[in-house]
Amino acid sequence: MPVFSLDPAQAAWCAQLRTLAAEKLRPLAEKAEPGRVNRPLVAALGELGLLERLFGTAGSPAPARAAAGAGAGAGAGAGPGAGARAFELCLLRESLAYGCTEAETALALQGLGSYPIVQAGTAAQRERWLPEVTAGRAVAAFALSEPDAGSDAAALALKAVPDQGGWRLSGEKRWISNAPEADFYTVFARTTEGAGARGVTAFLVPADRPGLAGTALEMLSPHPIGALTFTDVPVTRDDVLGDEDRGFRVAMNTLNLFRPSVGAFAVGMAQAALDAALDHTARRTAFGGPLKDLQSVAHQVAEMATRTEAARLLVYAAAAAYDEGTDDVPKRSAMAKLLATETAQFVVDAAVQLHGARALQRGHLLEHLYREVRAPRIYEGASEVQRTIIAKELYAKNPDAKNLDAKDPLAKGLPAHELHADGPYAEGTKEPYA
């Protein structure tokens, strides 16, 4: 098991990102209209080169790892689709989340919506859209969730009906980050009835296609999320991402890369809440002294710090496993997302408790984090689904427990790495977040 540490160059890069997020990106976030795509913020991410790093074209230094057998080639990036490294993505998302959650979300959503093109797109698709995305001129969206198909991905119902060598898309997508304002959507539609997850095809659908409409949804945290309605939307074979009826693999490859970094987003929020609690309890006096001198307070802060660091290390381990192409990526990714998002919820809530009523006032950092921290436990695989994935992976190595799939209706008999749940948020986002 590798031991993770950041070398001086990585630590300096993360510090620069936190400063950049707080000083340059947060002011843009604060000027935005709630619930709308913040195009100036997306453009700034492109101008600063952060979207290039997202796709691995201007990557940060590789992680410093000390472990028996970790040779010079460790972490060379063996995930599906050349480009993004999971470890770099985690450092980027954690650092941005610490200073500006809106910037982190905008960046993650660009990645979720565009990575299917990186891994499965044609040369023409890549040339048309990826330069626009990395420059921050085009907004992407990942359209998987439906009103009746969240955790149960096999129930996906958006239909792709054959039509003159192509298809017509009819149905609805819901809880789609960046909808209805995105410039293009990665859409997953059913091309073969009765085939479950193996009858789904991924399409690249520009927003100006006739028959495509959408409405915004108001959520707990005011990020851009909406519903899409498809009324005989035309798509051709030139719009297919990957192979026909193999779109679920495109979705899973994307989510396997981004799932650990949802944990990194959560760790960034947890660290921001922890630092706020440390500062507050050191300065605030009560009962004749600073709060930090009360054992109950000090022990709570110690628990918050310990859980945050444990979550961070598990996230880093999952990201390294992805980059090294190990066979236990689904389990590690699920563990990382589960622990990190549940930990962030605990740490933010504890920080609010230590601050008292002031943390509930609109505009306070912790009030903001309290609304932000809830969604990651749902999107890109709810905590309950992560536990199912972990259990399936564990029992898969136990010859006496091969019947787990048959007993678990949620799994639908799929391999653990194909089990997905975006819950009420979806697509990525953090969802809405993306």
Image (cartoon, rainbow, N blue to C red):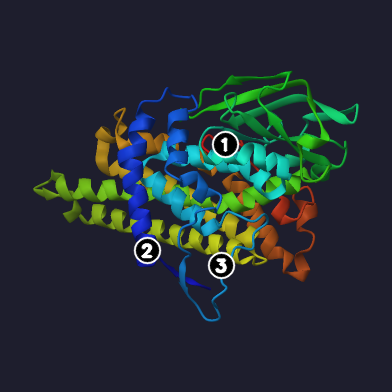
Crowding near the residue tagged with mark 1, few <14, some 14–19, many ≥20 C-alpha atoms within 10 Å: some
The residue to which callout 2 is attached is 9
Closer to the observer: label 3 or label 1? Answer: 1
Which mark is first along the chain, 2 or 1?
Answer: 2
Number of disc labels: 3
Residue 114 position within the rendered picture, expressed as x and y whole percent measured from the top left:
62, 41
Instruction: Name which residue type carries label 1.
Output: Glu
- In the rendered structure, find residue 190 and report the number of the disc placed on it: none
Q: CA distance from mark 1 to mark 2?
A: 29 Å
- Name which residue lies at 59% across and 25% down: 226
Crowding near the residue tagged with mark 2, few <14, some 14–19, many ≥20 C-alpha atoms within 10 Å: few
Q: CA distance from mark 3 to mark 1?
A: 29 Å
Residue 274 or residue 239, whichever sits in front: 239
Instruction: Name which residue type carries label 2.
Output: Ala
| Relative horizontal placement of residue 379, taking residue 415 as reference (left or right) | left
Q: Are dots 3 and 2 in contact, CB under 8 Å?
A: no
Residue 185 position within the rendered picture, expressed as x and y whole percent measured from the top left:
66, 32
Q: Quadrant of residue 99?
A: top left
- In the rendered structure, find residue 132 and report the number of the disc placed on it: 1
- Name which residue lies at 86% across and 30% down: 166
- Residue 374 sits above or below residue 217 on the image: below
Residue 362 or residue 59, whichever sits in front: 59
The residue to which callout 3 is attached is 75
Closer to the observer: label 3 or label 2? Answer: 2
Point out the residue furthest to the left here: 288
